[in-house]
């Protein structure tokens, strides 16, 4: 960390690794730990923190993310604030960690909770989805049976055999609301059959069935289940091209580049008629906390990252069953 003039904002960045309870499997592979990058900005004895998850799908790596944040030390020391940051860094994980850290610091300097500072309603507890990893139908049914008491389950699918997977899941959780995440694994050839299988299973929402940039078929086919953009949507600039193909958008702070853009994107998406989903990567409560502001107006909430870890950080979010509560000031905001 370079020297910082008195009164200027200081910056510290580090990479952390958090073991996952078991493993987490989607169509692109499995992992056993969450690798996060944490930014801490300090001023006048106060420290604001933000956390991000670099995502290989978007060519992001922890070390490069750390370096991108560290490169903002001089602009921060020169007075760059959260609003100016939007033009200095592109949307993505690095900007997310720094944006949320600056927002946390703003709240601490003002002596207010972040929602009051932003003129937003105080967040209330929301029902979050709980993720069932991709696997053979019988393994997914076994995992689902253990979580069948939860109100909302997110089911990871992966292409061939997904009809059998979702049918097995539904038998194991007859009363849970189901949403599906295909993670770009379907094709135009199996799209109709998989949509029908999900409709037959009473699925409420399907996330990103086709690869981003190759999703034109969604505009031509009847959609018996609402379809949500994930990899196809990042920030406000990507919203207009989704009309006619998607019914909802999954807002993730690691894609939008932080809470600042996420709030603006949620407002813009609703104005265009999209339902809102707030999603997450597998990460600690520090990543989830800012997303609770978006969750208040979201139809679907998927903020179960800490539930998938072997342990969470101190002062983490409170989960009671499927309810997730707003963050305490000791955690963030």
Image (tube, helix red, strand yellow):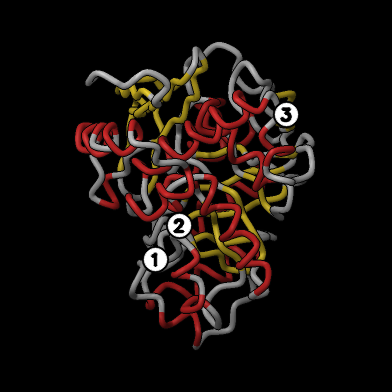
Mark 2, other Cα within 10 Å: few <14 / some 14–19 / many ≥20: many
Q: Can you give x and y, in whole percent of width and height, for residue 118 in the image?
A: 68, 44
In contact (CB < 8 Å): disc 3 and disc 1:
no
Quarter the C terminus occupies: top right
Residue at (74% x, 38% y) in the render: 116
Residue 169 in the figure: left or right of residue 217? right
Mark 1, other Cα within 10 Å: few <14 / some 14–19 / many ≥20: many
State whether residue 312 appears in this view: no
In contact (CB < 8 Å): disc 2 and disc 1:
yes
Quarter the N terminus occupies: top left
Extreme residue toward the front, this view: 6
The residue wearing badge 3 is 325
Task: Give the mark nearer the N terminus: 3 vs 1.
Answer: 1
Q: Can you give x and y, in whole percent of width and height, for residue 222 in the image?
A: 58, 83
The residue wearing badge 2 is 182
Q: CA distance from mark 3 to mark 1?
A: 34 Å
In contact (CB < 8 Å): disc 3 and disc 2:
no
Q: Quadrant of residue 302?
A: top right
Residue 216 in the figure: left or right of residue 221? left
Question: Can you tell which of label 3 and label 1 is closer to the viewer?
Answer: 3
Q: Secondary structure at mark 1?
A: loop
Residue at (60% x, 14% y) in the render: 315
The residue wearing badge 1 is 186
Task: Give the mark nearer the N terminus: 3 vs 2.
Answer: 2
Q: Quadrant of residue 223?
A: bottom right
Residue 319 in the figure: left or right of residue 165? right
Q: Secondary structure at mark 3?
A: loop
In this view, the residue in front, 43 or 281, is 43
Q: Secondary structure at mark 2?
A: loop
């Amino acid at each position: 960390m370079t020297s910082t003039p008195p009164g200027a904002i200081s910056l510290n960045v580090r990479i952390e690794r958090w073991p996952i309870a078991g493993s987490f499997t989607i169509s692109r592979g499995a992992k056993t730990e969450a690798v996060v990058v944490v930014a801490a900005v300090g001023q006048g004895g106060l420290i604001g923190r933000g956390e991000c998850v670099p995502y290989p799908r978007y060519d992001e790596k922890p070390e490069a993310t750390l370096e991108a944040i560290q490169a903002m030390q001089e602009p921060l020391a020169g007075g760059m604030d959260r609003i100016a940051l939007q033009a200095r860094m592109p949307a993505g994980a690095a900007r997310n960690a720094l944006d949320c850290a600056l927002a946390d610091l703003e709240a601490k300097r003002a002596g207010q909770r972040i929602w009051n500072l932003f003129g937003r309603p105080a967040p209330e507890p929301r029902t979050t989805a709980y993720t069932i990893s991709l696997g053979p139908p019988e393994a997914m049914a076994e995992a689902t049976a253990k979580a069948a008491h939860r109100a909302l389950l997110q089911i990871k699918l992966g292409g061939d055999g997904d009809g059998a997977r979702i049918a097995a899941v539904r038998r194991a959780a007859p009363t849970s609301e189901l949403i599906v995440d295909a993670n770009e694994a379907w094709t135009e050839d199996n799209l109709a059959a998989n949509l029908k299988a999900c409709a037959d299973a009473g699925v409420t929402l399907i996330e990103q069935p086709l690869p981003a940039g190759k999703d034109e078929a969604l505009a031509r086919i009847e959609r018996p289940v609402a379809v949500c953009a994930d990899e196809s949507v990042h920030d406000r600039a990507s919203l207009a091209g989704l009309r006619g193909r998607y019914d909802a958008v999954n807002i993730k702070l690691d894609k939008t580049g932080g809470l600042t853009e996420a709030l603006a994107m949620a407002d813009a998406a609703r104005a265009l008629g999209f339902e809102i989903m707030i999603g997450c990567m597998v990460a600690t409560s520090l990543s989830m906390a800012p997303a609770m502001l978006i969750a208040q107006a979201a139809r679907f909430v998927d903020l179960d990252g800490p539930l998938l870890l072997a342990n969470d950080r101190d002062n983490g979010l409170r989960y009671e069953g499927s309810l997730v509560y707003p963050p305490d000031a000791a955690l963030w905001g």
